[in-house]
Structure formats: C-alpha cells, structure tokens
Amino acid sequence: MRRILRSRAALGLALVADLLLYAGSHGPFDYSASSFEAALTLQAQVTDAWLSREGVVGTAIGVDGSGHAVLKVYLVSPGVVIFPTFVSGVSVVPEVTGRFMALPADADASVIDPKTNFPRPVPIGVSTGHGNVTAGTIGARVTDGDRIFALSNNHIFAANNGGQPGDNLLHPGVVDGGRDPADVIGTLFDYEPLRFCSGLFCDLNRIDAAIALTTVDDVGSETPEGGYGSPRSGTVDAKIGMTVQKHGRTTGYTVGEVSGLNATIDVGYAAGTARFEDQIVITGRGFSAGGDSGSLIVTKGVLLGDRRPVGLLFAGTATTTLANPIDLVLKRFSVRIDGN
C-alpha cells in the first residue's frame, strides 16, 4: 500500500522552505511556494493511477521556464499515453525517458581496463561488487565513528537481497577481473532490503543501499585522478537546477543537473520491478551507464558549496539518472561520509 500521503504535509513544508531559502531573483531554484504545493498535492492524487497505465514509469516535481512548479510524467516512448496540459491548475509535462533500470555492469563486458585494478587503498568511484554481481561502483567511504565502511547499492553489494552478512566484496568487480579471495576489500555488513512489486501491488522503497565493513588500508576517501577528489562530510538537499558531479566505474567523471524532486518511479531489476518514492532525478545524457550504480553524487560549484553529497546513484536510462537522497541512506546505517 502506498505510504506517500503519510508525510506529505511535512515533506511539502520542508521542500518549500528549501526553495525559499535558496531562491534568488533569477536563480535555478526560483519558483513559487504556492505552485510547488499545488504540484505536490496533484502528484499525491494521481501518481498511483497514472503509474498503472502502460508506458508510464514515474512522476516528479519539476519547474518550467516561467518559475512555476510542474508535474513531470516519465514515459517509455513518445505518445504512449496522452495527458491533459493542465490538471487542477498545474502544468503536466510529459518527458520521454524510457524504462528506468538498475545499473550494474553489462554481463557481457569484455576487456579489463588495467586502470580499474587499483592498489590499496582503493579509490572511491571505481569498480566493485559481490561475487554474484557483475560490477558496480564504490560510492564513498563512511564511518559510524568507530568502524569504517564502503557504501554502494544493495544490488551491487548484496546481490538483490541475495547476499549474507560476511560475504566477501571485491575490487574490481567480477566482470572486471576481480577474484575471491585475492581481491577482497571488505565484507557485507548491512543492507536495506529491496521490495519488489507483486502483480498490481507495489510496496514502496526509498533507498537501494548497502555497506561493507572495511579499513582505511583497503578503501580510500578520494576518487581517482581526474575525478572530483574527496567529498565533503556535510550533505545538502537536492534542488531543481543544481549542478552535480559523480565518478563511476563505467563513465568516470561526469556532470549533470537536478531536474526533478520527490520522484515516484518504477525501476527494473533482474529480480523484478521495484517502486521508489522521494527520489532525485538528474538530467544529462552520458551522466551514467551500466556499472555506475553506487556512485556518490555531489554538488559542483560554489553556490551551495562544492563536493557536498547529494545522492546515491542506483538507476537510470540513456538520458536520465535516479538517486536516493543521501541523508536517507546515511540515516539508515547511522553513518556519515568520511570526507573533508
């Protein structure tokens, strides 16, 4: 059963407060609180019904060029479903993304790039994975104050709920030549279970995340040369128009832009479809690809501070990337980013 209504008022107030705090006269976050509230209300009313239509894969709050919040509807192909231009005074904006998929590396990836086999301590933003997974990305080094962990996705570290605490995790991932036990960098410590849809019933997920117990001798806190370096310890909420950056196993260093907030999206996994709420949508062709799952997404620029963690990358299409809000991930495991 959907739980999206239970915290709708609190979520709306928090996001509106963020918008007012960061809005400028001509800034990318500049749209009215009233239009945002209207879009948020409409999203709560229609998302279940719209996601039941063939070809609709999600909704999110966006902004148009006139400074008004809009309701985005993500489609697998043009014209697959026709929506009215306005509903309850809110502009409805269809956007063709294709189907969202979790992003482990392709199983048929072939040539091993020697650059992905790093000496210890391994950088963040490079190849990793459970022995039963092709490969994904080490997102960040995190800590609870006493222990050190590597952060990535459930589907990378815990093999879509199939892993057990204590399982060995590798660098590089299996598809990149990693072998157990020679390439072990840590052991699975904890993960948030993924909840898959069953028929027409979809329980909701908020994060696809897992942590591995490791050491500072095995996993470092910076990306490889050419990346963004070390993330900050202090996080920041995503904002519409925010410029973000990441370093991942497949596409390396890339830059994109936050284009949607509070997204409810159906994501395809090998084990089935999982529905996620409260997600961040990032636009930018080439921002991510298969194997980038687990990458930490951080801010780029000076407006909100450079390299501040925003989200944990887990799924996408050719044009669009999805991320869990990083604070949800860190709170789940009671850890913080081990950065500067």
Image (spheres, helix red, strand yellow):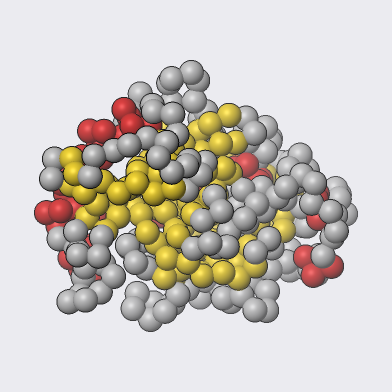
In this rendering, would 234 be left or right of 30? right
Relative to 195, residue 218 above or below: below
State whether residue 330 appears in this view: no
In this rendering, would 9 be left or right of 248? left
Pinpoint residue 272: horizontal percent, then vertical percent: 58, 29
State whether residue 154 appears in this view: yes
Relative to 320, residue 234 above or below: below
In this rendering, would 208 be left or right of 14? right
**Residue, far front:** 79
Residue drawn at x 54%, y 50% is: 317
Pinpoint residue 58: horizontal percent, then vertical percent: 40, 40
Relative to 84, residue 203 above or below: above
Pinpoint residue 19: horizontal percent, then vertical percent: 22, 63
**Residue, far top:** 199
Residue drawn at x 18%, y 40% is: 87
Q: Nearer the viewer, residue 26 or 77?
A: 77
Q: Nearer the viewer, residue 112 or 333?
A: 112
Residue drawn at x 68%, y 68% is: 123
Q: Nearer the viewer, residue 17 or 65?
A: 65
In this rendering, would 160 be left or right of 4? right
Q: Nearer the viewer, residue 128 or 246?
A: 246
User: In which image quadrant can residue 244 be found?
Assistant: bottom left
**Residue, far bottom:** 302
Q: Quadrant of the N terminus?
A: top left
Pinpoint residue 39: horizontal percent, then vertical percent: 20, 47
Q: How many marks?
A: 0
Residue drawn at x 38%, y 31% is: 51
